Image (tube, rainbow, N blue to C red):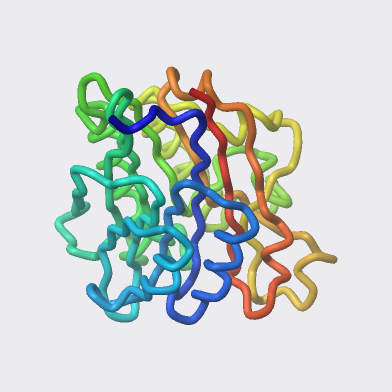
Amino acid sequence: MRAPMKKLKIATWNINSVRLRIGLVCRLLKEHNPDVLCLQETKCPQGQFPSSPLKELGYTHIAESGQAGYHGVAIVSRLPLNQIAVRSFCKKQDCRHIAAVIGEREPIIIHNLYVPAGGDEPDRTINEKFGHKLDFVAELEHWFGNGSVPEKHHGIVVGDLNIAPLENDVWSHKQLLKIVSHTPVETTGLTAAQKAGNWVDLIRQHIPPEEKVYTWWSYRAHDWELSNRGRRLDHIWATPDLARRSNGIEILREARGWTQPSDHVPVMATLKF
């Protein structure tokens, strides 16, 4: 009989092409040892995920939902992954969700999500991408309120949700109110989805809302670190039972300065059992 978990360390990272940055993925796994790593924007066709170097590091359980060139999500784990499932949103088969269950005595369902970015213009009447994003989040709200976590399971939602919901999740609340990712219609929608599932925001459970927190810095910045114009687009949420077991959160800011980095950095949460 497998011994119960003593702790669980789960990480999420928009890797922005897993084949291009597999070396960075390996570095994260070696240096920080998460039990589970959820990746978004893998940009990898199904069946071509670079699993060999990950399996050599002991991450032998991999679930992926990929397509050529765009989107894509994956779960990489040292723990067995059961009941692997994908969900399509807005009637699009665009590989933005994958779920798996870990644990036996206290099963946890992990939802790994990549919410649409929404384009540049925050007006659905002229920007179809923005409309898609709003519809996606509205569908999340309905689903979270109606069975995203099976009975007798704990639940975790991780991923690049592409929305910075709080004032201090962006470098300037006032200047970004009309910028996609922080507009009121987006932040209101994401907050409604969070409340529908009774999800606890683990980053803000450990870091007060009064403090600035970012997980993304644009490639367009000449010196991202000096300008520090970031946004908190990457999230880890948990059901209240799991949130009570959360004893730490890490935002690996230094990864933004690694060679050929993603514009997002890993976020990691540790839970005690």
The picture places residue 122, in percent across and down from the top left corner, at 46, 58
- How many numbered tags mark residues here? 0
Q: From the viewer's perspective, is residue 173 above or below residue 147?
A: below
> Which residue is at a point 43% across and 39% down the rendered structure image?
190
Residue 166 place in picture, x, y as percent: 61, 38
Farthest right residue in view: 226
* Left or right relative to 187: residue 28: right
Asked whether, in this view, residue 209 is left or right of residue 69, the answer is right
The part of the image, by quadrant, that contains residue 193 is top left
Residue at x 43%, y 61% (from the top left corner): 117
In the figure, 269 relative to 215: above or below?
above
Q: Is residue 85 left or right of residue 39?
A: left
- Residue drawn at 54 percent across, 51 percent down: 233
Q: Residue 53, how many percent across, how many down?
A: 44, 73
| 251 left or right, relative to 80 | right
Q: What x and y, as percent, mark residue 210?
A: 74, 31
Give the quadrant of the N terminus: top left
Which residue is depicted at the point 74% across and 42% down?
Answer: 212
Q: Is residue 87 visible?
A: yes
Q: Say if 25 sits above or below 138 in the image.
A: below
**Viewer-proximal residue among 84 and 127:** 84
Among all residues in the image, which is located at the extreme left? 91
Q: Is residue 131 visible?
A: no
